[in-house]
Amino acid sequence: MLVQLSFMTEGGSAVDQAALADLSRRQGVAAPDRSARHHMMKWGKGTLRWERHNEFSTYLWEGPLDRAGSRAADETPFGASFSAPGTVISGVRMEFRDWTAESERLIARFDVDSLCYSMVENGAAAIVTDFRQDGDGLTRVLVLDRGLSASRRGALAQRLLEIETYRTLAMLGLPLAQSLSPRLRRIEDRLAQLTSEMRNEESRNSQKLLDELTGLAAELEADAAASLYRFGASRAYDDIVEERLAVLAEEAVPGYDTWAAFLQRRVAPAMRTCRSVEERQANLSRKLTRATQLLRTWIDVEVEKQNRDLLASMNNRARLQLRLQQTVEGLSVAAVSYYVVGLVGYLAKGVTIAGLTVKPELVTAISVPVVVLAIWLFVRRIRRAHSDDARH
């Protein structure tokens, strides 16, 4: 008989190490090294084997059945004193019996609604289970043996244990897929509403729409990142189950399901659901990216229009400033010329007082065009000098 329990190791290897240390202490043997990934010790009339995997660990007890075909409650290590290292994900109780008329009658103890019964090893053995848990929470498996060698029995037991363990692990992705599906539906519906609003140019608020699209994309990517490992692991576990079923090479017993046919009906829909959610996430991510890019393009076009209008306004202001500057320069030339001509007039009057016969009015009149031209040339020269400095 084999009894195997599988536990998720969310707490890390330290929790496994503590459980193994407790079991080793009870048997009076040394605990395994912290870096060990497998360990074996004697337990009662049988042997306890421990193995650490990526995200779970297995505890397998193997021992003989008694004459009554049962076991004592204290023979296995999984009693009330056993400290579970994590959440139990699967438990299997497997019995190897000689194929006799008496042992064949044990098939009647399984649930007929989910009974799987098939021949393996070229007819040298039969495997029976209903994939239901007994009172101890273990999935019962019965192997009827017609003369398998010890190595063939070991290989068959390992495949059957792996099928049940990895089948359970593969199904861990289904609850996550079911929880993500309504959220994906909500994001899809909201994306449809936003793209409809994007088409209405009159009431379109590009910045608000962009904020909502960015929020939806962030929510989607967070969900995708959180589910990436679980969905990938479910696919890998499902592939292992299919490989083990293929190696079994079952032969159907008339009137009963094979393990492969039963699991195809039960596990395949769950895997399709996980793949469907993954594909919806990928497609929705691409749609959100396209919608965001389109909206950004519209925003860029609007910004370019605003920049064009701003540049046109700046050009108009520059032209107005230039005209104002030219006007101011003309007024400045007139004002300065007026004062300079006035100074010339005062100078002409002073010369007359000194005894020279000069008409101040005539001198003032003659100086007007000369002064205006000189002042205009002087102002023009200053403006050109400033223009050259600006270009440099």
Image (cartoon, rainbow, N blue to C red):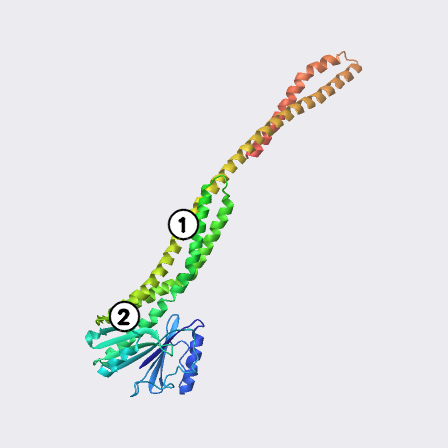
Q: Residue at x 62, y 23 (%)?
A: 377
Q: Position of residue 16 (x, y in %)?
A: 42, 76
The quarter of the picture where the N terminus appears is bottom left
The quarter of the picture where the C terminus appears is top right
Q: Residue at x 60, y 31 (%)?
A: 386
Pick the front one: 100 or 221? 100
Q: Residue at x 29, y 68 (%)?
A: 262
Q: Secondary structure at mark 2?
A: helix
Using the image, determine if residue 271 lies above or below residue 133: above
Residue at which label 1 appears: 287
Pick the front one: 44 or 71? 71
Pick the front one: 15 or 163? 163
The reply to whether callout 2 and callout 1 are in contact (CB within 8 Å) is no
Which amino acid type is marked by label 2?
Trp
Q: Residue at x 38, y 67 (%)?
A: 172
How crowded pointer 1 is (Cα within 10 Å; few <14, some 14-19, many 20+) is rated as: some
Q: Secondary structure at mark 1?
A: helix
Looking at the image, is mark 2 or mark 1 earlier in the sequence? 2
Using the image, determine if residue 278 lies above or below residue 193: below
Residue at which label 2 appears: 259
